[in-house]
Structures are given as C-alpha cells and as structure tokens.
Amino acid sequence: MRGYWLPLTLLAVAAAMSFLLSVTVGSASVAPADVWAVLTGQGTELQRTLILELRVPRTLAALATGGLLAVAGALMQVLLRNPLADPYVLGLSGGAAVGALLAMLAGLGGLVVSGSAFAGAMIATVLVFGLAHGTGSWTPSRLLLTGVVVAAGWGAIITLMLAISPAQRLPGMLYWLMGDLSYAGTPWLAITVLVVACLLVLPLGRSLNVLARGPMQAAALGVAVRPLEWGIYVVASLLTAVAVTTAGSIGFVGLVVPHMLRLVLGNDQRLILPACALAGGILLVLADTLARTIIAPEQLPVGVITALLGVPTFLLLLYRSR
C-alpha cells in the first residue's frame, strides 16, 4: 500500500487546485485572496453570496458527481470484465431521465424531480437485473445486452415525452438531459454516498482484482463470486442514481476516467477506485468551469463539455492501447 500514496496525493492536490480554479473563475472573476477572506469570515456581502452560496456548492457537487460516475464505471468494468462498460450503457441514466421528465411534465420541481430521477434509476436497475437473470443465472454478456436493449427503450420513451411536452418546458428538460449543475442544490448527499461507497468497496480490493480475471478463477481462489457480483451491481447502480439525481445525465466520465487510470496506474482496484473518486471529480469540475466561462455570461450544459472532451480522449486511449 505504500506505493499508492504518491499518485493519490498528487490527485488530491490536483483536486484542490481544480476546486480553487472553479471558485475563482467565472463570469465574474474572484481573486484567490478574496476567496480566502470569504472562507475566513471576511469579504463583502456580494463576494460571500457568490462564493458560499453559488460556486462552492456547485463545485462540491461537481467533485462528488464526477467521483460517483467514475467509481461506478470502474465497478461496472470489473463486473462485466469489459473496459468499455459504463453505467449509462445499462440503461440506468435512461430510467432516471424518464422519472425526472415525468415530474417536470407534471409541473413539479426541486426535490420531487430529484426523487423521481432516483426512483427511475432504481427501477431501471431492478428491470435490467431481473430481465438479465431470468429463470437462471446471468452472465456479463447477457447483462450487457439486456442493458443496451433497456436503454434503447428508455430512449424511445424520452423522445416521445419530449415530442408531447409543452414548448415552455422543453429548455429545462433538454438541459437536464444534457447534464447541468446549475440546479445541483446541496452536494452533501452525493459526497456522503461517495465516501461511504469507497469505504465499503476498498476492503474488497483483493477480491475485485481476482474477479477481474474471471469468475472461475475467483471461485477457485475462495471468492464468493455471486454475492460479490450482486453487491457490485447494487453499489454501482446506487452511485449512478445519486449522480444522475444531482446533476442530470452526464456521459463519458464513468467510461474514460477508469480506462485512463488503468493505463497509467495499472489494474489494482485498491488504487484504481480511490483514484477514480478523485480523478472523476477533477474532470467534471474542470468541464463545469469551462462550461461556465466559454461563452460567459451564458452557460453550456456540462454534459456537452464532457462529451466533447471524452470522445477524442477515449479514441486516443484506444489507439495507444492497441
């Protein structure tokens, strides 16, 4: 474990620097000295409102959401033994989107939309797992194919809902579908879930390393394969549901970050999982900062930025790992 501290320390420093950058940069720039003054109880009323009520909660939500998506992606890739696996491929975000859009169509907002998104994600989890299991046991390929089909079904329902929704509600619905941290609200639920999930899965690092080599080898080495697989799927689904509830549908974070870290740090889950929690947060914070500043004072959906960054990065990683 001694060799793990250097990369994790570097990632923690990078996370702190990205946090500072996000708080200081925007349509109205704030000097680092003014940020420190506000954090120590000084500064003007306008600065306190801008930093403590707007930028700090949004940055913390981005850190937590990125970490949730990256850890969920890493767990899914171990479960399916496929570096291209991602929670969104399994239809979890589609179920969450349907739940949230239903609440928006009903004229509801705030906590109701978040709760509906969470309920939709959990319904999608039960649906995919139940259909993949059937009357026998499920396999990674069967689970993946079932998730793809269910995701396609959610996509059709979303398209139908957008087609019949009132014109005045379309902008908010589209922004939510593209991922938006403007209305993230309190970040503490996402932070708490991320910390608890990391504390739960880190002791299973050795078992996850063995499971990544195949279920037969894991069983031969004494790993309880089926309970471990069920636990991975439930935890990854919960992480995805909380991330979607917090910031809407944001893609490519759970796909690119674990893949990139494995190329750099190896495939030891005891290092990859905490590194994903930090690196995913860094990526989403930087993407959200760019989304807030590139056409300031207007803002772009952060999901657009992650897609624009994620597609070429992932293609480059695939090319380098041929």
Image (tube, rainbow, N blue to C red):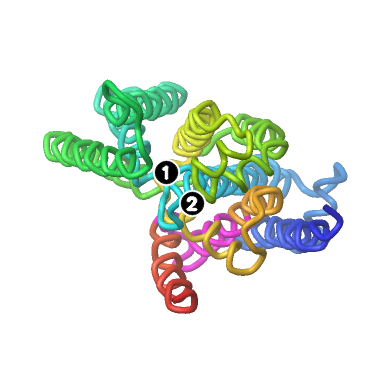
| Residue 229 tag number | none
Q: How many marks?
A: 2
Callout 2 secondary element:
helix
Cα separation between marks 2 and 1: 7 Å
Q: In the image shown, does 32 or 218 lie closer to the viewer?
A: 218
How far across and how far down the image is residue 140, in percent?
38, 42
Q: Quadrant of the C terminus?
A: bottom left
Disc 2 marks a residue whose amino acid type is Gly
**At x 33% / y 38%, what residue is drawn?**
143
Q: In the image shown, does 294 or 284 lie closer to the viewer?
A: 284
Q: In the image shown, does 198 or 145 lie closer to the viewer?
A: 145
Which segment is the magenta one? 282-303
Marks 2 and 1 close (CB-CB < 8 Å): yes
Q: Main secondary structure of the magenta part?
A: helix
Question: Taking 65 as reference, is 48 left or right?
Answer: right
How far across and how far down the image is residue 41, in percent?
85, 42
**At x 47% / y 44%, what residue is drawn?**
76
**Which quarter of the picture shows residue 300?**
bottom left
Q: Which residue is mark 2?
A: 254
157 relative to 62, above or below: above
Q: Which circle's residue, 2 or 1, is located before the other in the chain?
A: 1
How far across and how far down the image is residue 196, in percent?
68, 31
How far across and how far down the image is residue 103, in percent?
31, 24
Q: Which residue is mark 1?
A: 87
> Is residue 27 among what the camera can see?
no
| Mark 2 neighbour density, 10 Å: few (under 14) some (14–19) many (20 or more) | many
Disc 1 marks a residue whose amino acid type is Pro
Question: Taking 214 as reference, is 266 left or right?
Answer: right
Q: Answer whether residue 291 is magenta in the image.
A: yes
